[in-house]
Image (cartoon, helix red, strand yellow):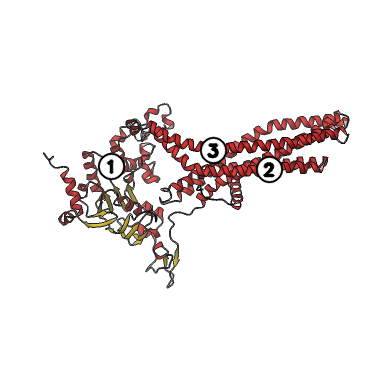
Amino acid sequence: MPAKTRVSTGRVLANIGVAARLAWAAAPGWSAALAGFAVLTAALPVAVAWSTRMVVDALGGHGDRAGVLGAALLLAGLSLAGAVLPHLENYVTADFGRRVGITVKLRLYHAVNRMVGLRRLESPAYHDQLQLALQGGLNGPEHGVLCGLRVASGALQIGGFAGSLYLLNPWLVLVVLLGSVPTLLAELAINRRRAALTADITPAMRREMFYAGLLTGLPAAKEVRLFGLGDYLTGRMLTELRSINARSRRLDQRQTVVQSGLMLLSALVAGAVLVWAVRSAQRGEMTVGDVVLTLGAVAGVQGGVASLTGAVGETYQSMLVFDGFRRIEEAPSDLPVPEVVAAPTGGVPVPRTPETGGAVVECPAPVDPAVVLAAATPAIELRDVWFRYDDAHPWVLSGVNLTIPAGESVGLVGLNGAGKSTLVKLLCRFYDPTRGGIYWNGTDIRTLPVEQLRARIAAVFQDFFAYELSAAENIGVGAIAAVDDRSRIAAAARKAGCHETLAALPAGYDTLLTRTFFSNEDRDDPETGVLLSGGQWQRLALARALMRPDCGLLILDEPSSGLDATAEYAVHAKLRQLRVGRTSLLISHRLSTMRDASLIYVLDDGRIVEYGDHDELMARDGRYAELFSLQARGYGPVPV
């Protein structure tokens, strides 16, 4: 839930229903048991009060002396039940929370995984919403159900004690309940403010965690120490933390003042009822047992109201936060497959796409995604592709036309910021073009199932990820169905030139490539975790991509940026073999690696400014020749 999102009361009530259904689906038995505990928790104090009245009156000569033993035994039994019940309830509540937590996590991460693109994940606002969803989703259903049961229990307790007061004097009910109304209203107001505060401070909390991660994490440790950034980052972290604490402190102070006033009001009401009961007993209008029951009932009603109002407030707050979970879960995919409809001239399936504004466009023949994607060497085309990340940003790509012929190796060069990485994101359909389209064997990729499309693509990203997993798993995730296929993993590692390195690790391919934690097998020897060099990770990332040997499109985005000259030569020699007869796109700043590409495109400021093979581009003496010559001079004789 973004900080500025308002949640209506109707939405909050709907959230309670959603949370209750979720909890019941996760733990139906424990949900029923907790409902039973709620009834018993409400009934026990009322039963104790009446039993106490019976015992006191019997001993004082106003009741049935013969039944005093039975009343005493009943009171003792109720006391035993009251002693045991909380422990049973605590056990059930804890296990209930664990079961609900598993269900909530599964649903939340399934919802996040439906976001097949990157637009939302690259949005700070979405991260704030996701942070609230994690908090509200994990705690909301459990907390909401438990608080809801506390509301029900409090209402039953109030009803039981109010009925007792009514039997003694109907006016007592009105006095005690009216004195409790301000408590209910104040608690609701305070919890609404606390929910709003949670949403407002989420960005600051995220920044505080970011600075804390820089101070304690390994990725930034070298620069933090070399540049002496410890105090600077600590100061930034404390600034955020103090801001969070200051806002929380102001609300706590307000809550303390309000609740102190409410407690004073409750004490005054209880004191007034006590005086009235004592005077009534002195006049012979009430027995001592009636006085005891009156005092117990007043305390019970006030306690029930306090419990109910607190639970209502907490339920309201938890359901406000839980709304963030619902919004994440209800959000449609950020890259939906367009609706397929029948063309008006003959029932031929055609797509509704952003380009057509939802209009029906005739298609010459139905398209079967399995047939389109089955081609071993597809042709890829970008037709007049325009793209920007949102309307507030400039165009990253402007009218790009680019073709990767079937089975051909194409190169893409350009300066930093030219749009190369964005183009890769579009090819993998992490985003859709703002205008224009990308075609796989003549079919717009927006009409193809995303999972099937990506299964036909292998890529080494410039910012590849180093998983804190074993060496085998780091490669195997490139084809998750084969993550346990050691022969296939080793074959990919050999092609990438990292097999010998991984086989020589302390536990071979089973060695963890991290020092953050250790596996069950390594629990007695955490030092078995190993950190690879940048060049070694580069080879491993290449092996990960090679886990898909039959991919239709191979994308290599700076595949040798972390390698030394010898390793780079070896890797590109291997890549030349792998790219023969395969549809592939190579992106590199090192133009010497482009010489064997059948076609080279030069991207400058989001536009294709020239294309051709190496010799043609050098003969044209344009942008490519300028960049190539500039790099070549760097390897020439040093000027004197």
Q: CA distance from mark 2 to mark 1?
A: 72 Å
* Label 2 sits on residue: 182
Q: Secondary structure at mark 3?
A: helix
Q: Tell me, for residue 248, which label it has, or none.
A: 3
Instruction: Check disc 1 and report the residue beneath it.
Output: 496
Answer yes or no: is residue 417 visible: yes
Left/right placement of residue 532 relative to residue 264 reads left
Question: Which is in the foreground here, disc 2 or disc 1?
Answer: 2
Tag in front: 3 or 1:
3
| Label 3, label 1: how far apart the Cα atoms are | 54 Å
Residue at (51% x, 44% y) in the render:
200
Q: Judging from the image, what secondary structure is the residue with disc 1 in?
A: helix
Q: Nearer the viewer, residue 73 or 378?
A: 73
Horizontal and vertical percent position of residue 490: 32, 40
Between 559 and 423, the residue placed more toward the observer is: 423
Q: Earlier in the sequence, mark 3 or mark 2?
A: 2
Q: Position of residue 29 (x, y in %)?
A: 63, 42
The answer to whether residue 47 shows anywhere in this view is: no
Q: Residue 92 lies in what quarter of the image?
A: top right
Q: Label 2's element? A: helix
The image quarter in which residue 436 lies? bottom left
**Disc 1 residue type (three-letter):** Ala
Labels in figure, total: 3
